[in-house]
Amino acid sequence: MPIYAYKCGSCGHAKDVLQKISDAPLTECPACGKPTFSKQLTAAGFQLKGSGWYATDFKGGSGGTSAPASVAGGAAAATETASAAGSDAAASTPPAACGGGCACH
């Protein structure tokens, strides 16, 4: 439950009151009895510290938002490297679905 600050407009009496949000605001001053008791605007009672959490704060990788710079160039380079090593170029060519820029190659 929040704590609200009240102040009387007639006598100046101030008081902090623990109330439910759904409770009606107090209007009668407990000191002088006049109906000039009103809520005061106060600062929040908590403070957020630290850098916070952002959509880019994932445990690893770039979050999957950017593609490799050259998918076609990467596949061609992989083929050239495989043929230079003496292995079959068709076996090292990545499937068309992944483009060769994924972690499975």
Image (cartoon, rainbow, N blue to C red):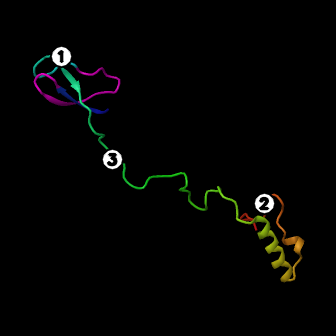
User: Label 3 belongs to which residue?
Assistant: 47
Image quadrant occupied by the C terminus: bottom right
| 33 with respect to 43 (left or right) | left
User: Label 1 belongs to which residue?
Assistant: 35
Q: Is mark 2 on a helix, strand or loop?
A: loop
Q: Callout 1 environment at 10 Å: few (<14), some (14 to 19), or many (20+)?
A: some
Q: What residue type is labelled 2?
A: Cys
Q: How far apart, in angstroms, are the residues tagged by discs 3 and 1?
A: 34 Å
Using the image, determine if residue 13 lies above or below residue 52: above
Provide the residue span drawn in magenta. 8-26
Please tell me which residue is depicted at 53% across the width and 56% down the height of the picture.
57
User: Label 2 belongs to which residue?
Assistant: 98
Q: Which mark is residue 17?
A: none
Residue 35 position within the rendered picture, expressed as x and y whole percent measured from the top left? 18, 16
Q: Callout 3 environment at 10 Å: few (<14), some (14 to 19), or many (20+)?
A: few
Residue 24 position within the rendered picture, expressed as x and y whole percent measured from the top left? 30, 20
Q: Which amino acid does label 1 sit on?
A: Pro
| First-in-chain label (3 vs 1) | 1
Please tell me which residue is depicted at 83% across the width and 77% down the height of the picture.
80
Q: What residue type is labelled 3?
A: Gln
| 80 with respect to 60 (left or right) | right
| First-in-chain label (3 vs 2) | 3
| First-in-chain label (2 vs 1) | 1
Q: Is mark 3 on a helix, strand or loop?
A: loop
Please tell me which residue is depicted at 12% across the width and 22% down the height of the picture.
10
Residue 47 position within the rendered picture, expressed as x and y whole percent measured from the top left? 33, 47
